[in-house]
Amino acid sequence: MNQTAQIPVETILREELAHGDTALGTVAPILGHLVVSPDNTLFSDEIVAQVRGMASSVAGQMLSAQGREAGVNDLPAFVEEHCEELIGHLLTNAGFLSHCHALSIERQLAQRLHDRSAIDVVLSPLLQALIASDDPDVSSNAMAVLTAQARFIQQQGRMELPLKELPGDLFHAAVLTWRTHAGEGLDEITAAAEMRLRAEYDEGAGRLGLMSRLVAGLGNGVLAALSISHAGVAIFLTALGACSQQERDLVVQSTNDRQLGRLALGLRAGGLKPKEIEEQFVVIHPNVALPEGFDLLRRDRAAEILATSSGLAAS
């Protein structure tokens, strides 16, 4: 038998992935329009409010740094005066917008699974076991993840996004956006403020960096992190990204009910067996069944199909 011959379920999953890619391509433009719309009463969706809140948080931190460097007397008034314009500029960056969107989806998923399945939003069984490890490095990193995750949940509740929690490329893009639109005659002030912000930034010390290190440290035991009820939402998403070679934000998007094909393919490419994938769907999408013949899909074929996706570019 030709081992590269396509089986029917692969066609189904390719089509599902293509539909998902199309949906992802509309996320940034539509969300960007909703967030900057002057008539927010028409768009009361929690996600829109959350994304705008995070953009406002990031803008406020950069403007505060600028104001302190300039010796502004009334810092809150200075931030308020310039914040709206900077928010608008930040939200023209599709990557920044998509990241804020992904964080909002992650928080909603964590809360939904907590309410429905009693999965703790901070302390999972896997994290608890790692904290109790005899290896001091493992235990210490797990404790750092616990603290960072608890902080993330609190910050999301306040619609905050600390600059130091942004991935490196988005931190750089946000700072560059601020510098570009800081105003005339402020080059020295903004340069000094930027140096201070960059000196305080450490990507590896942020929540995402800590979780990436924790997942990498699991070695051959990483598949244990692909159980969302055992690992918790945050570590599960990080592990799925690492195992399926996808960006974490894209993995977060795959938990949406319009991205079922991507989620199934990611879990298979990540190393789970069909039965184990069914178990994850029971938790995340309890009313969805995998397509007939999914048990015939090989791991390498799932990875190949996933690699053809345009979703990463779209996000």
Image (cartoon, grey):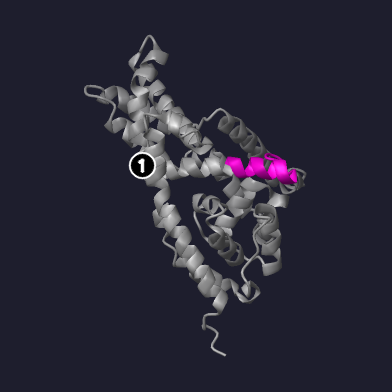
Residue 113 magenta:
yes
User: Which quarter of the figure has residue 184?
Assistant: top left
Q: Is residue 187 left or right of residue 314?
A: left
Q: Nearer the viewer, residue 285 or 170?
A: 285
For label 1, the SS is loop
Expressed as whole percent of the image width and height from the top left, the position of residue 263 reads 57, 59
Residue 124 in sight in this render = no
Residue 253 in sight in this render = yes
Q: Is residue 173 left or right of residue 188?
A: right
Q: Residue furthest top?
A: 73
Q: Nearer the viewer, residue 226 or 168?
A: 226
Expressed as whole percent of the image width and height from the top left, the position of residue 219 reads 65, 59
Expressed as whole percent of the image width and height from the top left, the position of residue 28 reads 40, 46
Q: Residue at x 41, y 35 (%)?
A: 35
Per the rendered image, the range of residues in magenta is 107-123
Q: Nearer the viewer, residue 169 or 138?
A: 169
Q: Residue at x 57, y 53 (%)?
A: 255
Q: Residue furthest left?
A: 184
Residue 105 magenta:
no
Instruction: Give amino acid for label 1.
Output: Asn
Q: Residue furthest front?
A: 42
User: Which quarter of the figure has residue 180?
Assistant: top left
| Mark 1, other Cα within 10 Å: few <14 / some 14–19 / many ≥20 | some
Dominant secondary structure of the magenta stretch?
helix
Q: Residue at x 31, y 28 (%)?
A: 191
Q: Which residue is mark 1?
A: 93
Give the answer, above or below, for where 74 lies relative to 49.
Answer: above
Expressed as whole percent of the image width and height from the top left, the position of residue 267 reads 61, 62
Quadrant (top left/top right/bottom left/bottom right) for the N terminus: bottom right
- How many numbered badges does the structure rendering display? 1
Q: Nearer the viewer, residue 40 or 179?
A: 40
Q: Residue at x 37, y 9 (%)?
A: 73
